[in-house]
């Protein structure tokens, strides 16, 4: 009986030790962090381009390379530095929108980095049609001039 108890104890101990000896994988965290994933311009006048700056940070331990920043259409233009972002550093991505078409818009911008990783940011807003002239003609002024 003692041999059986000792054998069971030995088997149980080896299972527990083996389970603890297995290396555990630590989940990889995304080194590219964006302070805001979307920006709403609100209402903007037609024909007046607007811009917004997105700040990205490298929270990893290695330099991070922004390989490409690509907009979903030609009315949106991103600008960014091709220099690597050092560990703990930040960079700016300036996104411009040409408010030529009237109406609501939502545009996505894809950030390609570190050989195949992608993150998306979004700009949105509403373009309102501007009047053809700055203000209507005031006819009451001519009436006042004609009064004797």
Image (cartoon, helix red, strand yellow):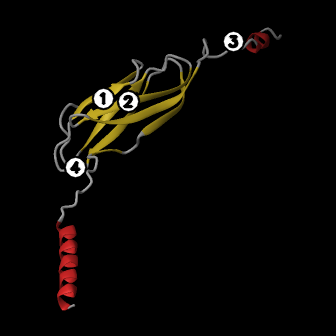
- Mark 3 falls on what kind of element? loop
Q: Give whichever of discs 2 and 1 has the lower sequence position.
A: 1
Q: Residues within 10 Å of mark 3 (few under 14, many from 20)?
A: few
Alpha carbon distance from label 1 to label 3: 47 Å
Label 4: few (<14), some (14–19) or many (≥20) C-alpha neighbours in 10 Å: some
Between residue 48 and residue 136, name the one nearer to us.
48
Q: CA distance from mark 2 to mark 3?
A: 43 Å
| Residue placed under numbered mark 2 in the picture | 109
User: Considering only order in the chain, which callout, 1 or 4, is on the residue closer to the N terminus?
Assistant: 4
Q: Would residue 115 be found to the left or right of residue 121 on screen?
A: left
The structure residue drawn at horizontal position 75% and vertical position 11%, both measured from the top left corner, is: 139
Are the residues at dot 2 and dot 3 in contact (C-beta closer than 8 Å)?
A: no
Whether residues under marks 2 and 4 lie with C-beta atoms below 8 angstroms apart, the answer is: no
Where's residue 77, x and y in %? 36, 23
The mark found on residue 60 in the picture is 4
Give the camera-side residue of 15 and 81. 15
Of mark 1 and mark 3, the one earlier in the sequence is 1
Q: Position of residue 105 (x, y in %)?
A: 52, 26
Considering depth in this image, is 49 or 67 the residue closer to the camera? 67
- For marks 2 and 4, give the CA distance: 22 Å
Residue located farthest toward the front when viewing the structure as drawn: 1
Query: What residue sits right under mark 3 in the picture?
Result: 137
Q: Secondary structure at mark 2?
A: strand
Of callouts 2 and 4, which one flags the residue occurring earlier in the amino acid sequence? Answer: 4
Q: Mark 3 and 4 residues: CB-CB less than 8 Å, in contact?
A: no
SS at badge 1: strand
Residue denoted by label 1 = 69
Residue 148, position as x, y percentages in the image:
83, 10
**For the point 79% across and 11% down, which residue is it?**
143
Q: Residues within 10 Å of mark 1 (few under 14, many from 20)?
A: some
């Amino acid at each position: 009986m003692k041999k059986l108890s000792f054998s069971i104890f030995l088997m149980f101990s080896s299972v527990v030790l083996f389970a603890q000896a297995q290396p555990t994988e630590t989940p990889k965290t995304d080194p590219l962090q964006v302070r805001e994933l979307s920006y709403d311009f609100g209402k903007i006048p037609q024909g007046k381009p607007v811009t917004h700056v997105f700040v990205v940070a490298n929270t990893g331990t290695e330099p991070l390379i922004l390989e490409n920043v690509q907009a979903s259409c030609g009315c949106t233009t991103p600008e960014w530095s091709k220099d690597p972002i050092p560990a703990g550093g930040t960079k700016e991505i300036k996104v411009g929108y040409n408010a030529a078409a009237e109406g609501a818009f939502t545009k996505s911008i894809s950030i390609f980095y570190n050989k195949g990783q992608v993150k998306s940011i979004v700009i949105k807003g509403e373009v309102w049609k501007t009047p053809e002239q700055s203000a209507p003609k005031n006819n009451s002024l001519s009436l006042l001039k004609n009064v004797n």
